[in-house]
Amino acid sequence: MQHADTRVFAKPLTDEFRRRLLEARAALLRTVALTDEELAALDRPQPSDPPEHAASASAAALSAGLGGREKRELDDIADALRRLARDVYGACESCGMPIPLARLLALPAARFCLGCQASTEASA
């Protein structure tokens, strides 16, 4: 029994998307590491000047916000890599139609076509 080819893109193109996703993941991890190092430097004890204390407090708040966004981006990249492994990368998770190549080139971890993305955002 033969299975239908469910791949949305040819292998050379999926290899290119895998490379882009892995590069994006590596860059994001480097950014997180640099951010943690920079925030650690900001949190080192300083003369007890109130503006410096405020800077440390805002740096901690910034760190909390960035952590959530960066984790979500890493999760999106991991999901896209799983879709590549299952040969369903490039298909909209909502309607099943192909996601336009230009959208995937701009956002390699995109899960939805433009129409479904707009619907998802409108209902959020």
Image: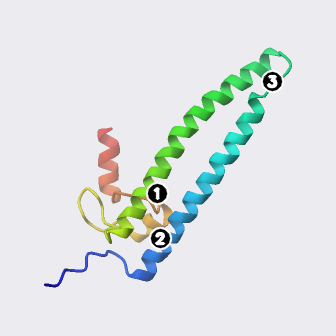
Task: State the residue position of label 1.
Answer: 77
Disc 2 + disc 1, Cβ < 8 Å? no
Residue 10 versus residue 110 in the image, above or below: below
User: Does residue 35 appear left or right of residue 101 in this picture?
Assistant: right
Per the model, the C-alpha gap separating discs 2 and 1 is 11 Å
Mark 1 or mark 3: name the one nearer the start of the chain. 3
Q: Out of 110 and 116, give the one closest to the viewer.
A: 110
State the residue at coordinates (13%, 84%): 1
Mark 2 or mark 1: name the one nearer the start of the chain. 2
Q: Quadrant of residue 62?
A: top right
**Within 10 Å of the Cα at label 2, are there few (<14), some (14-19), or many (20+) other Cα atoms?**
many
Residue 59: x and y in percent read 68, 30
Helix or strand or loop: what does disc 1 sit on?
Answer: helix
Residue farthest to the right?
Answer: 47
Q: Out of 39 and 122, give the one closest to the viewer.
A: 39
* Dot label at residue 17: 2
Q: Amino acid at mark 2?
A: Phe
Residue 60: x and y in percent read 64, 28
Residue 32: x and y in percent read 63, 46
State the residue at coordinates (79%, 15%): 50
Task: State the residue position of label 3.
Answer: 45
**Within 10 Å of the Cα at label 3, are there few (<14), some (14-19), or many (20+) other Cα atoms?**
few
User: Does residue 8 appear left or right of residue 24 in this picture?
Assistant: left
Q: Out of 108 and 37, give the one closest to the viewer.
A: 37
User: Does residue 91 appear left or right of residue 30 in this picture?
Assistant: left
State the residue at coordinates (56%, 60%): 24
Per the model, the C-alpha gap separating discs 1 and 3 is 37 Å
Helix or strand or loop: what does disc 2 sit on?
Answer: helix
Residue 54 versus residue 103 in the image, above or below: above
Q: Out of 121 and 75, give the one closest to the viewer.
A: 75
Residue farthest to the front?
Answer: 1
Per the model, the C-alpha gap separating discs 3 and 2 is 44 Å
